[in-house]
């Protein structure tokens, strides 16, 4: 992004100071020369806004410190600007251009915050859920949910492969962010989500055979 | 694995969520901008695959919430109302 950052220091003509109409983004970013430089600078400002918004929303970012948060905002905005510029031909106009562009900054900022917040934390890739207290509101609810929870625990042990068990417990029981686990296991969010999806299918089938599942899910745990 | 191991109520809900029909994280990302705008600007429900993905994928859900909050003003909504509308549509 160094070359982009140099271009941002160019003075801007007053006629370029107004907001772009949504339909103007693609032609301006696809232009050459000065018009392109101005449009890229505007895009970067848009990405900074979205990255800042995302970082501010994330509880995990609070403990990182202002300087680190600011680094992440700028790094995510830079990466998102590159992502958007390299994918202009993929924009099909199904949403506002700005909404389409924002999602890249939100993604980059979200991934960076999750990874930064977990940087120094060990992840125990256990294949057994830890024992913990449950916050049941009544003895009846406690008994129902405990029965289901024990069936789920059995399902984890019996219906899942070792890999599915480790991924599923890390993501859904220990609540390790998916981007953090993907980095540690040298894989992707998409690949881990596929593992989760398959695990849930197996668990639901296991529970269904034992009479726990309704069509939409175990009603005992729905709000 | 001895005795009564209790998963929290929330963990059991996450583990048993019905995430059919299948939608990948990449497809979710492709759809999220148009899906969020349609949700905030109309009464059309979320596509079932997209809804199921947000129910089952915490990271994509968090990012969709963030996008809804960011564009809420285009739909004359507050950020909180936009996120609440998304969460209600997801069933989260
Ligand atoms: Zn996802």
Image (cartoon, coloured by chain):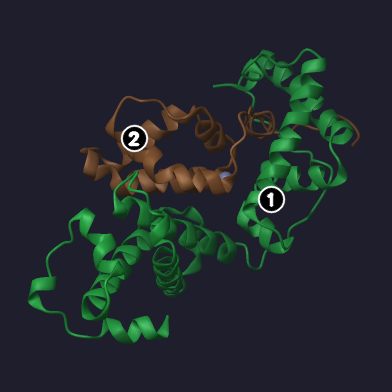
- Kindly identify which chain the residue marked by label 1 belongs to: A
B74 or A84, nearer to the observer: A84
Q: CA distance from mark 1 to mark 2?
A: 28 Å
Circle 1 SS class:
helix
Q: Is mark 2 within 8 Å of ligand 1?
A: no
Q: Which mark is residue A111?
A: none
Image location of residue A119, percent across then percent down: 63, 67
- Residue found at the far right of this picture: B2
Q: Chain of mark 2?
A: B
Which residue is nearer to you in this view: A189 or A123? A189
Which is more toward the observer, B51 or B69? B51
Q: Which class describes the residues within 10 Å of circle 2: few (<14), some (14-19), or many (20+)? A: some
Q: Residue A15 vs residue A220: left or right? A: left
Chain painted in brown in the figure: B
Give the quarter of the figure containing the N terminus of chain A: bottom left
Q: At which x and y percent is residue A9?
A: 25, 85
- Label 2 sits on residue: B38
Q: Is mark 1 within 8 Å of ligand 1?
A: no
Question: Is residue A173 at all visible to an observer of this figure?
Answer: no
Crowd tier of the residue under label 1, counting other residues whose Cα lies within 10 Å: few below 14, some 14–19, many 20 or above: few
Residue A11 appears in the rendering: yes
Q: Is A91 placed left or right of A185 in the picture? A: left
Q: Taking the image as four quarters, which one is ligand 1 found in?
A: top right
The residue at the point 62 percent across, 28 percent down is B20
Q: Which chain is green?
A: A
- Which mark identifies residue A191? 1
Identity of the residue drawn at 54% across and 60% down = A111
For the C terminus of chain A, which image quadrant?
A: top right
């Amino acid at each position: 992004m160094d070359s982009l950052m140099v271009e941002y220091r160019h003075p801007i003509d007053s006629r370029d100071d107004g907001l772009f109409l949504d339909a103007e983004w693609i032609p301006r970013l696809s232009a050459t020369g000065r018009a392109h430089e101005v449009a890229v600078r505007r895009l970067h400002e848009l990405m900074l806004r979205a990255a800042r918004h995302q970082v501010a929303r994330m509880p995990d970012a609070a403990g990182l410190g202002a300087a680190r948060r600011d680094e992440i905002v700028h790094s995510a905005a830079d990466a998102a600007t590159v992502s958007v510029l390299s994918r202009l031909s993929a924009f099909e106009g199904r949403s506002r251009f700005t909404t389409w562009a924002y999602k890249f900054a939100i993604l980059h900022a979200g991934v960076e915050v999750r990874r930064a917040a977990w940087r120094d934390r060990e992840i125990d890739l256990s294949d057994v859920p830890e024992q913990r207290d449950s916050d049941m509101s009544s003895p009846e609810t406690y008994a129902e949910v405990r029965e289901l929870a024990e069936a789920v625990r059995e399902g984890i042990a019996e219906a899942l492969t070792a890999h599915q068990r480790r991924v599923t417990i890390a993501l859904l029981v220990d609540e390790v962010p998916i981007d953090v686990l993907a980095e540690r296991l040298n894989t992707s969010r998409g690949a881990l989500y596929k593992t989760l999806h398959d695990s849930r299918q197996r668990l639901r089938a296991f529970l269904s055979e034992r009479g726990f599942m309704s069509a939409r899910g175990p009603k005992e745990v729905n709000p | 694995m001895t005795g009564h191991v209790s998963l929290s109520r929330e963990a059991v809900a996450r583990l048993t969520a019905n995430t059919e029909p299948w939608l990948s994280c990449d497809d979710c990302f492709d759809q999220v901008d148009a899906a969020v705008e349609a949700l905030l600007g109309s009464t059309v429900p979320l596509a079932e695959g997209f809804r199921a993905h947000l129910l089952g994928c915490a990271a994509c859900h968090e990012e969709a919430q963030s996008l809804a909050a960011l564009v809420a003003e285009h739909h004359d909504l507050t950020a909180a109302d936009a996120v609440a509308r998304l969460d209600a549509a997801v069933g989260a």
